[in-house]
Image (cartoon, grey):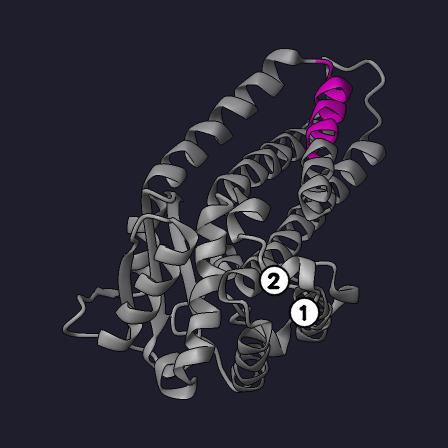
Amino acid sequence: MEQIKTFLLLGAMSILLVFIGGYLGGKGGMLIALVMAGGINFYTYYFSDTMILKHYNAQEVDPREAPMLYRVVERLVERGSLPMPKVYIIHDHIPNAFATGRNPSHAAVAITTGLLELLSEDEIEGVMAHELSHVRHRDILVATIAATIAGSVAFIANILQFGAMFGNRNNRNGNPIFMIAMAILLPIAASIIQMTISRSREFMADEGAGRLTGHPEWLQNALIKLSNYNVRGEVQGATPENAHMFIISPFEGKNLSFANLFRTHPTTEQRLERLEALKKVLNQPNEQNKLYDRHYS
């Protein structure tokens, strides 16, 4: 269901882009916007892991430096038939974690020292299973596609704004007031769709974690602790642009305005409810012997 939802939302963003391109009446302008946004996001896609890890001063560790964490990750990748990702630790007292990398063969998981201190080994396994589910679902690719389209919408919206200010000679029907309204509302609409896609992928990763560990309650317990702690502060250097990467939004205590439209994550209550429903499904005899790969291959 979440896969279908993501596909429909990406389609909606594409239609939005085509609509404003058609309104401007210039296929060439839309093509330029797509090429520029695509080039930026191509670079981001291939080098995002290096950039984001450097941004948070993440330090790669080996089994000797983080034996418990390595043990958890190795157990999960073996169970999920995944390549072993690089493992990083971020020295920050705020508990959080994220995954990055363009595909399972080029992936990394990062966890803060605050999370390692706060959670039990089972809860850490639930968190790492969530991040590895993101890797398996290729969520970085999906996020990049969404960002490319949203970036193109924002770029064309700027063209609309300048067209309204200085006169749009190429569009006979150009109404300055309508163009200004579109310049304001279209990027907002694209951002809302982009955030909805992000929330959809979080639900998928939660379910993937529950199925991979066989214990959704491990992730439930972790989410409760992380949510309660993250309202007190945020990971140093956190920005709205990369907030969607974390298992809990770094801005959890500030993300309550505008009817939650711009939330990068579902509410903790929503995630706990989904995981509770998953527990009932996994307790059914016909589900206990089903492999994780059958659901997420």
Q: Are marks 1 and 2 in contact (CB under 8 Å)?
A: yes
Q: List the residue tagged with mark 1.
A: 283
User: Is 242 colored magenta in this rendering?
Assistant: no
- Residue 101: mark in rendering: none
Q: Residue furthest left?
A: 64
Residue drawn at (71%, 23%) of the image: 18
Asked whether 154 or 137 is in front, the reply is 137
Q: Which is the main secondary structure of the residues drawn in magenta?
A: helix
Asked whether 211 or 202 is in front, the reply is 211
Which span is picked out in magenta? 13-25
Q: In the rendered image of this protein, does residue 90 appear above or below residue 85?
A: below
Element under disc 2: helix
Name the residue type under label 2: Gln
Q: Position of residue 93 (x, y in %)?
A: 36, 84
Residue drawn at (68%, 74%) of the image: 272
Name the residue type under label 1: Asn
The residue carrying pointer 2 sits among few (fewer than 14), some (14 to 19) or many (20 or more) residues within 10 Å by Cα, namely few
Q: Is residue 22 left or right of residue 212?
A: right
- Residue 288: mark in rendering: 2
- Quarter location, residue 132: bottom left
Asked whether 295 or 164 is in front, the reply is 295
Q: Is residue 81 left or right of residue 185?
A: left
Q: Counting residues from the N terminus, which is met first, the one under dot 1 or under dot 2?
A: 1
Q: Position of residue 244 (x, y in %)?
A: 53, 58
Residue 264 visible within the image:
no
Q: Is residue 15 left or right of residue 86?
A: right
